[in-house]
């Protein structure tokens, strides 16, 4: 049983839920500022709430899941991660975090002989993980990649894009913004890419009103793999092959050819709350387990951190091109249920 300290009570609440739902993880406590929200969360799980690092007991082989904004976003997550490692905790630091911050923390982890991992739950979601695996088998066959994301999910988008174009550094050729959506066109080696980012934030809650979480479309010489959203599904559309024509001059198809829209990763049709409570928490639990079972100084651990540094580097490069998100007022985008029912009625065949 791996004990976990969750640091933060906003998105940290999702990490706490992930630990609570996992049979092999145990919530050791909550570290937060002492707000009413954090007190309520600690009471709900029946765990202690600590507000100072000096009060957190040392635990060997335990994991501190730091879910606070990093210095890159004006927070104290990076500083807290270093203090916890100095106290002997293995640390899972939630993204986004800059490459230079990871390198600085790596020196602290090495000095204290503890583990440092950077979390990225999106890469562990079933549809995203499947797309990444398939792309890995298509090395040399991928012609172009299209990624959709929001300003809030730009680092996971950069991480996925880097894996799909398979190495190198991105070269940006064109950037344009229309109606709050920024399109970034570029290439990496011989693979072209288009990154489309909803670059607006709600003025009250920056996590509200996102038009996209994370989607991908991989254009290969054999067909197109499309994942409209990280919740799935992921569909395969093979390259058109007419085959022979029948007596009426129509294509008869090729024997054994895959159907269009073949489902490679299905989706139950998630509500957002279930997607977070079930899929996100399962992915977070896997991030925590990976940190818990890592070995200090092992080859796999070094490769894991090297990937995180590369992801952060791409995030920084792409962020500079895309720019800061504009502020959007809630009333400008909120749509009521009646509007959606009208859309559904139009979509129904007559």
Image: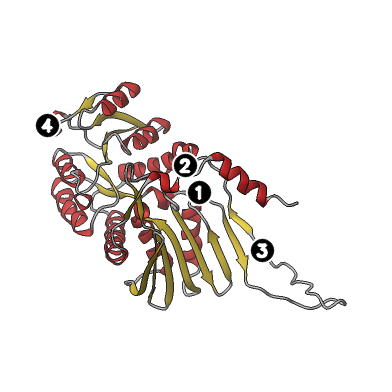
Disc 1/disc 4 C-alpha distance (Å): 40 Å
Which numbered mark, 2 or 1, is in the foreground of this view? Answer: 1
Name the secondary structure under disc 4: helix
Name the residue that disc number 2 marks. 279
Q: CA distance from mark 3 to mark 2?
A: 27 Å
Q: Which mark is residue 260?
A: 3
Instruction: Please determine whether, in this image, residue 286 is positioned above or below residue 38.
Output: below
State the count of labels.
4
Question: What's the residue at 53%, 51% (across, down)?
Answer: 232
Q: Earlier in the sequence, mark 4 or mark 3?
A: 4
Q: What residue is disc 4 on?
A: 54
Per the rendering, the mark at residue 231 is 1
N-terminal label among 2 and 1 = 1
The answer to which of marks 3 and 1 sits earlier in the sequence is 1
Give the distance between the C-alpha atoms of the residues marked 4 and 3, in whole angstroms: 59 Å
Mark 1 or 4: the one toward you: 1
Q: CA distance from mark 3 to mark 1?
A: 20 Å
């Amino acid at each position: 049983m791996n004990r976990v300290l969750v640091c933060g009570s906003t998105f940290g609440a999702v990490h706490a839920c992930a630990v609570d739902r996992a049979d092999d993880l145990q919530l050791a406590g909550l570290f937060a500022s002492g707000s009413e929200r954090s007190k309520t969360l600690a009471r709900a799980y029946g765990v202690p709430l600590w507000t100072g690092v000096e009060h957190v007991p040392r635990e060997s082989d335990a994991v501190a899941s730091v879910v606070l904004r990093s210095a890159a976003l004006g927070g104290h997550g990076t500083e807290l991660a270093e203090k916890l490692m100095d106290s002997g905790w293995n640390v899972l630091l939630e993204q986004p975090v800059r490459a230079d911050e990871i390198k600085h923390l790596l020196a602290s982890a090495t000095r204290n002989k503890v583990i440092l991992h950077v979390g990225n739950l999106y890469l562990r979601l079933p549809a995203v993980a499947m797309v990444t695996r398939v792309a890995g088998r298509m090395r040399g066959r991928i012609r172009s990649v299209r990624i959709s994301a929001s300003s809030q999910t730009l680092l996971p988008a950069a991480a996925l894009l880097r894996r799909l174009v398979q190495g190198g550094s991105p070269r940006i050729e064109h950037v344009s913004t229309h109606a709050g959506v920024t399109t970034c066109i570029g290439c990496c080696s011989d693979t072209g890419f288009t990154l489309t980012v909803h670059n607006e934030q709600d003025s009250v809650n920056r996590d509200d009103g996102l038009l996209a979480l994370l989607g991908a479309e991989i254009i290969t010489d054999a067909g197109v793999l499309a994942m409209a959203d990280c919740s799935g599904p992921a569909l395969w559309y093979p390259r058109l092959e007419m085959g022979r024509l029948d007596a009426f001059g129509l294509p008869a198809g090729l024997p054994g050819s895959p159907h269009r829209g073949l489902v490679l990763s299905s989706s139950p049709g998630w509500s957002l709350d279930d997607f977070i409570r079930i899929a996100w928490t399962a992915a977070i639990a896997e991030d925590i387990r990976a940190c818990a079972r890592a070995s200090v100084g092992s080859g796999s651990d070094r490769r894991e951190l090297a990937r995180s540094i590369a992801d952060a580097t791409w995030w920084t490069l792409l962020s500079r091109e895309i720019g800061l998100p504009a502020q959007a007022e809630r009333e400008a985008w909120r749509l009521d249920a009646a509007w959606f029912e009208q859309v559904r009625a139009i979509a129904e065949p007559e």
